Amino acid sequence: MVALCRKYGISRQTGYKWVHRYQQLGCCAHALTDLSRMPHNHPWATDQELVDLVIRARKRWPNWGPVTLHQWLKRVNPRVPIPAPSMYEPAPSLKVRAPKRLQRPGSRPPTRTQLLPLS
């Protein structure tokens, strides 16, 4: 086994892992490929029902901030554990974003060159 692993430039641990997997799976093409390292379950994931509720609330009340949303969720679902307010804004884990507000043309703040006096 040592000579075989040295010949192919892999560690003995990888060599034994591939042999064991080949014996388990047989002559499959994916027996010698790397398997996904993604976990099979996510114990700390937010419940999908709560995610849907937050998404509906964000659409209905787009001006509400994370603290207001958190208080509302605690009132609506007093027995359900609600995550911290930081989960709602900008909510990368929930993929919930507040709708962008449109700016009126010409309402942008002046740039530095507009503020400098001409000399």
Image (spheres, grey):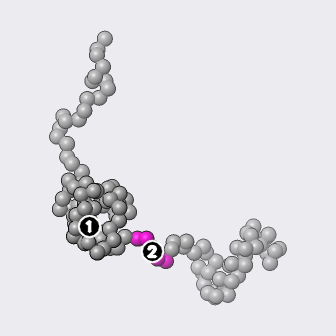
* Residue 63 relative to residue 21: left or right: left
User: Residue 66 appears in which quarter of the rendering?
Assistant: bottom left
User: Residue 42 appears in which quarter of the rendering?
Assistant: bottom left
* Residue 34 relative to residue 102: left or right: right
Amino acid type indicated by mark 2: Pro
Q: Quadrant of the C terminus?
A: top left
Residue in the foreground of this view, choosing between 33 and 60: 60
How would you rate the neighbour count of disc 2 (Cα within 10 Å): few for under 14, some for 14-19, many for 20 or more? few
Q: Is residue 63 magenta?
A: no
Residue carrying label 1: 74
Task: Return the mark for residue 43.
Answer: 2
Which-is-in-front pick, marks 1 and 2? 1
Is disc 2 placed on a helix, strand or loop? loop
Residue 57 visible somewhere in the drawing: yes
The residues bearing labels 1 and 2 have C-alpha atoms spaced at a distance of 22 Å
Q: Would you place residue 118 above or below residue 30 in this image?
A: above
Lower sequence index among marks 1 and 2: 2
- Residue at x 26% of width, y 72% of height: 78
Amino acid type indicated by mark 1: Lys
Q: Main secondary structure of the magenta part?
A: loop
Q: Quadrant of the N terminus?
A: bottom right
Query: Whole-percent x and y of residue 60?
Result: 17, 62
Q: Which residues are magenta?
A: 40-45
Residue in the foreground of this view, choosing between 62 and 105: 62
